[in-house]
Image: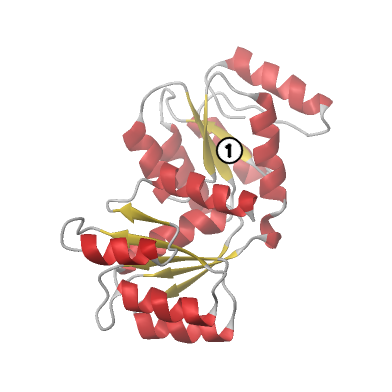
Amino acid sequence: MVDDNISLCKTISFVLSRKGYAVTIAKDGPEAIERVREMPFDMIFMDIKMPLMDGVETYKRIKKIKPQAVVAMMTAYAVEDLVQEALEEGAYGIIYKPLDIEKVVALIERARETNQGALVLVVDDDPGTCVTLKNILSKRSYKVGIANTGEEAIAMVQKKAHDIIFIDMKLPTINGLETYLTIREINSEVVAIMMTAYRQEMAELVEEALRNSAYTCLYKPLDMKKLLTLVDEIQERK
C-alpha cells in the first residue's frame, strides 16, 4: 500500500491482514521504489496524488525494476489525465476513494488468476494503439494478440478461437466491417468491439457492424477506463 495517508494505509493493512494477506506500507514514491527492490510483491496499490513523486511517475520507475509488477492506482480526486496515463502505462485498474474493501479484495483475487485470462485480438494498423491495448489488457489477465490488417486478423481467427476482438474500422486493405463480417462467419460467438477515430466518415459502416451483432463501437482517443469496464462486463456475462 503506497499512500501518504498513513492512517488509511494502516487501516487497509489491518483489514487485509485479517483476510490472510501480507501487507507492507510505503508513505511515498521513493520509499515504494525501495520496497520493490527488496521484495517481489504480488500486487501494489498506489495513490496517484502524493508529495515528492506522483503515483504515475512512481509506477513508471517501478516498471523499470519489475516490468511484470501488478499495480492498481487509487485516487480521491478528479485526475482523469493521470488516470488515463496510468492505464496507458499498463496499470491494472483504478480504485476510487473512499476505498471499498470488497473491491480491493476482488481486484487482488482477479490479479491472482492472471494466467486464466480470455483470448483477445486487437486489429489496428496503428502500432501505438496496438501496444497500448496489449499492455493494458495483459495487466488485466487477458492474453492479447495483434493484427495490423484485416487479412492477418482473419488468418489468426481461423487458427484459434478468440473471445473478444477489437477492430479498427479504417484498415489498409479490407476495412473493419469486411473484416468483422468475415470473422463472424468463422466464429459467430466472438464478441467484436469496433473502433474508429472517424465518427462521421465511418458512421454507416459502424451502423452496419452493429446491425450485424457487433457489441459496440468505441471512439478514439480511447477512454481506457470505459474500455476496461466494457471488457470486464463482457467476461462476466460469459
Q: Residues within 10 Å of mark 1 (few under 14, many from 20)?
A: few
In the image, residue 171 lies at what x, y percent?
A: 27, 75
Q: Residue at x 41, y 67 (%)?
A: 212
In terms of image quadrants, where is residue 193? bottom left
Which residue corresponds to mark 1? 34
In the image, residue 78 lies at what x, y percent?
A: 36, 25
In terms of image quadrants, where is residue 114? bottom right
Choose between 23 and 126: the one closer to the eye: 126
**33 to 135, vertically: above or below:** above
Q: At numbered mark 1, what does the secondary structure look like: helix, strand or loop?
A: helix
Residue occupying the far top of the picture: 7
Choose between 7 and 237: the one closer to the eye: 237
Q: Is residue 40 visible?
A: no
Residue occupying the far left of the picture: 201
Q: Quarter of the image for the N terminus: give it.
A: top right
In the image, residue 176 lies at what x, y percent?
A: 32, 72
Amino acid tagged 1: Glu
Q: Residue at x 59, y 22 (%)?
A: 99
Residue occupying the far front of the picture: 211
